């Protein structure tokens, strides 16, 4: 069973070997470390940039314009907020030149809370990301999706933001269908092949398993669990938490349909709306701050198009509108949606009687 | 500012061929006439806003002439700011296209009526889309240069911008990324110093005597020149480019230029007396050297003015973009074979 | 009748003379220009900063921490997108130090389309702004509110973002109650007193009218027009356009209640919800791009709290989700809500029958 | 990196008083013991993350000792990065408070359990909240210095940060804003150069021989010193501060330091052999000069270690923040009289 970082690493490897990736770069992305989460270990084209996020995004744009295929990393999305203008510029390149230029690049960055990362390693970026016209935006919730979305991001002719839920990075594939195809079934074997050893790494070379060109289309959601009573729409690390909530609620006779969006833009309205039409109830869950939140957009669209389908007011459950996620466990838990909060909102919405 | 300007070093006095001088003059004059036409269009309501490069022709034209023009990393990349008409004409741009952009027609090849005048874009010549935010081009330029460093050959990246804008962190980013030891980038980093940012004079905003001095700490070769003299510009650019093309290392070139019609239409766009006018000075020189007559120069100006006036009338009849065009080109379409090859999930 | 720029200038003058403002600064804010919209002409403490938005926001924070009272300008909000991290930092200063430090500063910036400003002089900033916890956010729609909100911003112990709709800056007060109290009723007289002359300004000094400490409380909306059939909630330049729409619709027998929010955070939910409870129909109008838009937050709150009050699905009318506002008139008009669009949405919502 | 380090100029060899040396040693030792306690706490699960300054004591302690401590622009402002424990202890901070922050207790006076270890904040001493984003302090620091320039007196602004972070535009912002001609700011701009950014070595990322060289173009006085020697540090800081206090102009001081426990707990936080250990070197010196004995030094360390161990046990019993505390201090309350004076609309 691979972890999400291993999956990302394998996708990047396939990217550089078969899909023209020329540069995988960012702070501590190259040797010796290969990324603060080990996501870029052993990659042929990985290199360390200066500690300068504006330079990183700028260089990625330039590389893309010059026909290279860059995958740039922002070490934590918390450090991308001084680059919004450049991200906007990348998203506008094709449009503002009336189709003359395009800007195929990938920016990857770890997002979200859940690891006691305190104020500056807990930020979400989904609300910001969905405000970047011209970008495609993805966020996987398991190794297979991470692998397949990264490959789709790499071959896309547009800028693609790949957000990796940091709390899931080191987690192994849990369920069937979450594994990267082609990897050895023994964890230790995979680890021996592609994880850099501790200590001196100068002579180490990875042995890559033979993994396929699995492309998970950008814009396609995944129904994580079928159900009839209520639709829960989420992504990233909250997929697992919502799955747990659904398990708990199944015991109470509430049958949850859980949708893992995977792509935030373009997003799979076909799947979401079909589900809401079936269950007539919906909760949108994410952990970004709740004022001007992407879940609110989804809720607005639900109201626009499905108002008369609804048996209960649709709900958004998101992070608190405060300046940061505090470090103490009590503070972190109170700041972003926890299992209990989710169970309560789903239950109330499922049980709601007009 | 009272800094003295270095002479271009070796070969500084070697004179350029008369043909080349006349070609430069022709392009400078056309660039000036074009800008004056754009200013007029805007004042007459045939455009919403004017910004451009009158006063930078003596630098911009030689720059354009010296560019290795083409598409892809084998050729030079240009990250221009919004005063690059002279450079574009020297590259061979059709001046009528600039009128189209001013008039925001659907036929505007640079932006389809989306962007301001002087916001050029030409993929066929590696001219990256000019965008209004000051200095972001200095953060992007190292990217094209990185690709060129890898590609090899003699293609280089050229980035231009104003003096005031060097206060943005992006200018420092450019110096840092281009000079990393062992990873130097083939970049000609240009600052056209007109000693103003809109209304704010250079003095009081800068601790540096010369902006070019900022390169020294990074081991970047630097030079400050009189950018109002096209001969000086030509020689300096050509020497700097030689260095960058061969050494594959950055060069920081500061050109002192004029801002002959003020900042933009927002500040009136009237001819400013008292600023050195590189075109006039050059004409005087060519006339003194008997390479040109006043009559010929005047005739050239009148003829081209007429031509553009007529062109402007035709452009006025060209269609504006249609409302649905806002949705065009939000996303580029897949053209990569891989997209079809892969297994769907 | 004063213009909004004059109103801002007078408020800044009162701020520096009576409320401790020490620094009014930004690009071209000081002499000779006094701001690209003339909003800072003749002010004693106005000065020109380097062309560096990060430096401007950073310096404002430092000044505020050191007990000065800065009003910093970002020349156009389009150029604030590389400072989001610093804005977040200012908003977090009090909270992250657990109340030890505070950061009383004003950032002012012109926003919005409507002047053929093309891609980089047409941005809105309201969605971004409402994603800055710890900030108070205001946007006036007339000179009096500009004056009173600026003064409230100045005396507030928190960072306050003052967004000025650029299309309104040079407009005179139109209706009764939109004038700054204490100004001469003759425009030309006021202009002679406080507008810098063309040409040499080195010897010019303004003569300031005696204007009062009018404080428009942050967090209080203004009912622009009372009505019974439908609530329209907006702010900034769309107040006038919605007013015109209301006038047009009055002829069709649709009686619009128009709310000018004035404060986007904290916002006046008491006024908004009372109105929706009365009219049972609501449209939220703004010109920022429509995905993850502040109007969607207001709509979500409406659904959360007033679902069963509604006789029609609530609507958000906002700008198109595209990389920029194009320059050509046809493009600008198609990108941000126009009178006709607004009339149509209000009409449809008012006429909607369940 | 193979640059040589300048000697501190005049007075370099003048020796510091024994009392002062012993006081420096005491503080350096306490700072080290404190960091080692914090590291231990984190490893034992009494904290989520460690980052701090072991290896910077020989610079940080003298810096703290030389600060004019107090609240408001008459005193020095400090914009520290996350390796400032030595400086804080020298200012008089209670080491137990650092344990509280590590344990994320409600009693943590720096952030109420919200922020990471070494993210200090102390308004009473003008210590601006340390925040994690690299280099933003360099953009804010000119603001406090502006207030001090206006205020007059001898208060200055001190800003510190690492070597890798100087690649961010904010470092350039600091150089630019502090050196504008006629508007120079009283700032001591410090870079503590440990030759690493997390895993990335200095070499290959910098075109500058020395980071301090970047000041030259701006007319900023600069110096690079061996920051592992507290005597050198003390003299250099004191001279630089004298200049800044009197001339009201910026000074850029680069101190070469060590990173004795690696980057942070994320990189293991184990003692790195082979890096110069300023504390050990200083102890050897003091012992050689007969100002200290090995026994006394060891006893000091053991005693303080014991004290902190006990304190840590007590801190472990202190209450965590309560969930509702997340809502505290989102906004500051009005205390300005004007708020009540005005007419309501
Ligand atoms: C990031 C950013 N900030 C502000 C502006 C507004 N603005 C447009 S041009 C200009 C002055 C630029 O001065 P300089 O860099 O010297 O170039 P010049 O116009 O003199 O050629 C300013 C402030 C902008 N376009 N972008
Ligand atoms: C803006 C930003 N980018 C990235 C990081 C992650 N990060 C934390 S410390 C660090 C390295 C800093 O190196 P340096 O500036 O040399 O300081 P040092 O830690 O060596 O003292 C990085 C990349 C961050 N905190 N902030
Ligand atoms: Mg200029
Ligand atoms: Mg370092």
Image: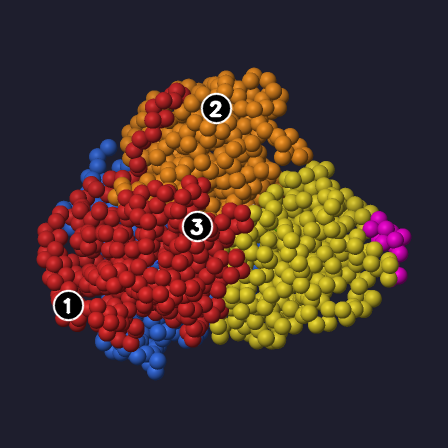
Chain colours: A orange, B red, C blue, D yellow
Is A171 drawn above or below residue C83 in the view shown? above
Mark 1: few/some/many CA within 10 Å (<14, 14-19, 20+):
few
Mark 2 or 3, closer to the camera: 3
Image location (x, y in percent) of residue D144: 55, 65
Give the residue displayed 52% in from the left and 30% down from the top. A9
Residue indicated by mark 2: A144
Q: How dense is the environment of label 3, judged by Cα within 10 Å: few (below 14), some, or many (20 and up)?
A: few
The picture quadrant where one finds residue A263 is top left
Mark 2 Cβ and ligand 2 under 8 Å apart: no
> What range is drawn magenta here?
D290-303
Q: Distance between the residues labelled 3 and 1?
A: 40 Å
Q: Where is residue D128 in the image (x, y as percent from the top left)?
A: 59, 59
* Mark seen at residue B296: 1
Tell me the SS state at disc 2: helix
Q: Mark 3 points at which residue?
A: B246
Q: In this view, does D310 lie to the left or right of D47?
A: right
Q: Same chain for marks 1 and 2?
A: no
């Amino acid at each position: 069973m691979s972890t999400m970082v291993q999956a990302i690493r394998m996708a990047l490897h396939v990217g550089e070997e078969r899909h023209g990736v020329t540069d995988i770069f960012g702070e501590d992305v190259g040797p010796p470390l290969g990324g603060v989460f080990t996501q870029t270990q052993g990659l042929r084209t990985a290199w360390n940039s200066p500690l300068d996020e504006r330079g990183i995004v700028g260089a990625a744009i330039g590389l893309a314009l010059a026909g290279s295929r860059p995958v740039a990393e922002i070490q934590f999305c918390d450090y991308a907020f001084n680059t919004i203008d450049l991200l906007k510029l990348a998203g506008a390149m094709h449009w503002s030149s009336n189709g003359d230029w395009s800007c195929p690049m990938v920016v990857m960055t770890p997002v979200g809370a859940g690891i006691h990362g305190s104020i500056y390693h807990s930020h979400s970026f989904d609300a910001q990301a969905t405000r970047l016209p011209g970008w495609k935006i993805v966020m996987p919730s398991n190794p297979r999706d991470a692998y397949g979305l990264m490959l789709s991001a790499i071959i896309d002719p547009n800028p693609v933001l790949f957000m990796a839920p940091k709390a899931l990075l080191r987690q192994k594939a849990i369920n069937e269908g979450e594994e990267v195809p082609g990897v050895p079934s023994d964890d230790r074997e995979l680890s021996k092949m592609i994880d850099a050893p501790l200590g001196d790494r100068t002579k180490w070379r990875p042995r890559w398993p033979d993994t396929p060109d699995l492309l998970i289309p950008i814009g396609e959601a995944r129904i994580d669990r079928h159900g009839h009573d209520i639709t829960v729409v989420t992504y990233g690390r909250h997929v697992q938490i919502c799955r747990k909530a659904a398990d708990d609620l199944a015991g109470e006779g509430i049958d949850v349909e859980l949708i893992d969006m995977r792509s935030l833009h373009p997003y799979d309205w076909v799947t979401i709306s079909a589900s809401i039409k079936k269950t007539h109830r919906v909760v949108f869950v994410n952990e970004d701050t709740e004022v001007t939140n992407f879940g609110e957009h989804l809720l607005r669209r639900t109201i626009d198009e499905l108002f008369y389908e609804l048996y209960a007011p649709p709900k958004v459950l998101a992070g608190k509108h405060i300046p940061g996620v505090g470090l103490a466990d009590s503070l972190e838990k109170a700041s972003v949606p926890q299992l209990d909060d989710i169970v309560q909102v789903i239950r109330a919405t499922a049980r709601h009687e007009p | 500012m009272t800094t003295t300007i270095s002479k271009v070093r070796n070969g500084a006095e070697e004179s350029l061929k008369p043909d080349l001088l006349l070609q430069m003059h022709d392009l400078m004059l056309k660039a000036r006439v074009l800008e004056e036409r754009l200013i007029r269009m805007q004042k007459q309501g045939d455009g919403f806003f004017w910004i451009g490069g009158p006063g930078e022709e003596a630098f911009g034209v030689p720059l354009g002439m010296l560019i290795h023009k083409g598409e892809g990393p084998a050729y030079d990349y240009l990250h221009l700011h919004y005063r690059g008409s002279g450079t574009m004409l020297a590259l061979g741009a059709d001046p009528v296209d600039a009128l189209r952009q001013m008039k925001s027609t659907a036929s505007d090849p640079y932006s389809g009526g989306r962007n301001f005048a002087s916001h050029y874009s030409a993929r066929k010549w590696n001219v990256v889309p000019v965008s209004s935010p000051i200095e972001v081009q200095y953060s992007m330029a190292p990217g094209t240069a990185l690709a060129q460093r890898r590609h090899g050959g003699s293609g280089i990246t050229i980035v231009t911008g104003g003096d005031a804008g060097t206060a943005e962190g992006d200018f420092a980013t450019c110096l840092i990324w281009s000079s990393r030891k062992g990873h130097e980038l083939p970049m000609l980093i240009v600052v056209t110093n007109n000693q103003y940012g809109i209304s704010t004079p250079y003095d009081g905003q800068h601790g540096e005597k010369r902006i070019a001095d900022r390169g020294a700490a990074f081991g970047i070769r630097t030079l400050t020149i009189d950018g109002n003299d096209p001969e000086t510009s030509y020689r300096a650019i050509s020497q700097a480019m030689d260095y960058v093309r061969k050494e594959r290392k950055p060069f920081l070139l500061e050109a002192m230029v004029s801002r002959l019609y003020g900042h933009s239409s927002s500040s009136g766009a009237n001819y400013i007396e008292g600023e050195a006018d590189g075109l006039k000075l050059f004409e005087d020189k060519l006339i003194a050297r008997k390479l040109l007559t006043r009559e010929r120069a005047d005739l050239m100006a009148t003829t081209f003015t007429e031509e553009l006036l007529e062109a402007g009338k035709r452009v006025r009849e060209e269609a504006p973009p249609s409302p649905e065009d806002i949705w065009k080109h939000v996303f580029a379409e897949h053209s990569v074979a891989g997209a079809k090859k892969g297994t769907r999930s």
